[in-house]
Amino acid sequence: MAWYADESPCDYFGDDAAPILRAIGWLERGQPILSGESNQEVYEQLKRLAVDCWQPRMCVGLHPCNLCQHEAESSGSKNLFIPADGFLYVCPELIMHYMNAHGYTPPAEFRRCVLACPPMNSMVYRKSILANGGRVLMRAVKS
Ligand SMILES: [Zn+2]
């Protein structure tokens, strides 16, 4: 898994999608990890969203957690796309493990957008993805 600083442009899904994607929770051992107050509400909402989360039609690999001391206790392959103000946040589903096991606290603006995010199988969500530049994700297939 690639490392991105929180809120930096994310080119993991191709260069054409990078300008509208901002990374959250792409953590890696040796890099600073934001921590702060507990985020039960945000955590629960991420869990709800991840159950039936929208994925662009592109292949991505498995992300093992490399913050765990020994073997990774957790891994994930999905990514969550959270509509923001004119762009999308993208976080690996491992963000829930990072919050739960490693004391990670995502930035406040991201937390606000997570709590406002509609269910990902809804039309409102699709429209919100499109309205914030996500069309590039709808058509792109990573080769
Ligand atoms: Zn871990």
Image (cartoon, rainbow, N blue to C red):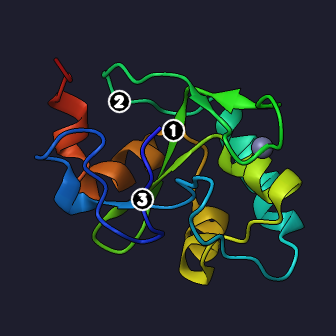
Is residue 132 visible in the rendered image? The answer is no
Q: Quadrant of residue 138?
A: top left
Estimate the spatial distance between the alpha carbons at disc 2 and disc 1, rounded to whole Å.
Answer: 9 Å
The residue that label 2 is drawn on is 56
Q: Is residue 96 left or right of residue 34?
A: right
Looking at the rendered structure, the kind of residue marked 3 is Tyr
The residue that label 3 is drawn on is 4
Estimate the spatial distance between the alpha carbons at disc 2 and disc 3, rounded to whole Å.
Answer: 20 Å
Nearest to viewer (mark 2 / mark 3): 3
Looking at the rendered structure, the kind of residue marked 2 is Pro
Q: Earlier in the sequence, mark 2 or mark 1?
A: 2
Nearest to viewer (mark 2 / mark 1): 1
Q: Measuring 67% from the left and 66% from the top, which residue is drawn there?
A: 115
Where residue 123 sits: x, y (%)? 44, 40
Q: Measuring 17% from the left and 29% from the top, which residue is drawn there?
A: 140
Where residue 105 sits: x, y (%)? 72, 71
Label 3: element kind: loop
The residue that label 1 is drawn on is 79
Residue 77 or 2: which is nearer the viewer?
A: 2
Label 1: element kind: strand
Q: Is 9 above or below relative to 127? A: below
